[in-house]
Image: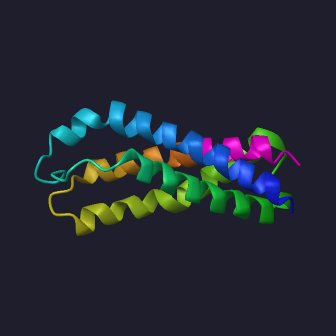
Amino acid sequence: MNWTKVFLAGLVGGILSFFADFVMHATILGSTYGKYPDVFNQAEGNPLWFLLISLLVGFFASLLFAKTRDCWSGGWKGGATFGFYLGLVFFFSQFYSTLVIEGFPYFLSWCWGATTLISLTIMGLGIGLVQKS
């Protein structure tokens, strides 16, 4: 395993995921969050924490991709496929929000599941571009 490629792929995937999440949550879903002030009543978080978490997820996804490299096709297609399946794993975990956050709308769990699926597919695409072979 080439550790340089693992770290670089994690960095690229994490940054791509961070920007995809920003676009989806801040731009597309931002007005939806404003409709539920009782649910989303916290102070805004520091964006650097979100970037750090995206980079950590990117690194561990890159490591998992490298360890299972023979299962995926080469290049961005294999990475996107990996990211899609990883996104499916996390898709349904978004439904915990409805169970544990009072007033959390059920449809928003579907939205968060979809954004997670898209974000991790994009992350996988970036990982696959760096870890071509």
Question: Residues in magenta?
Answer: 122-133
Q: Position of residue 89 (x, y in %)?
A: 54, 62
Q: Is residue 128 magenta?
A: yes
Say which of 108 and 60 sits in front.
60
Q: Residue at x 57, y 53 (%)?
A: 55
Does the segment drawn in magenta span residue 59?
Answer: no
Dominant secondary-structure state across the stretch colored magenta: helix
Left or right relative to 46: residue 121? right
Residue 51 in the figure: left or right of residue 121: left
Question: What colour scheme does the image use?
Answer: rainbow
Q: Residue at x 20, y 50 (%)?
A: 43
Question: If the image is split into quadrants, where does the N terminus sit?
Answer: bottom right
Point 42% across, 53% down: residue: 49
Q: Position of residue 95 (x, y in %)?
A: 35, 61
Using the rendered image of the protein, determine whether residue 9 is visible from the camera's viewpoint.
yes
* Quarter of the view holding residue 77: top right
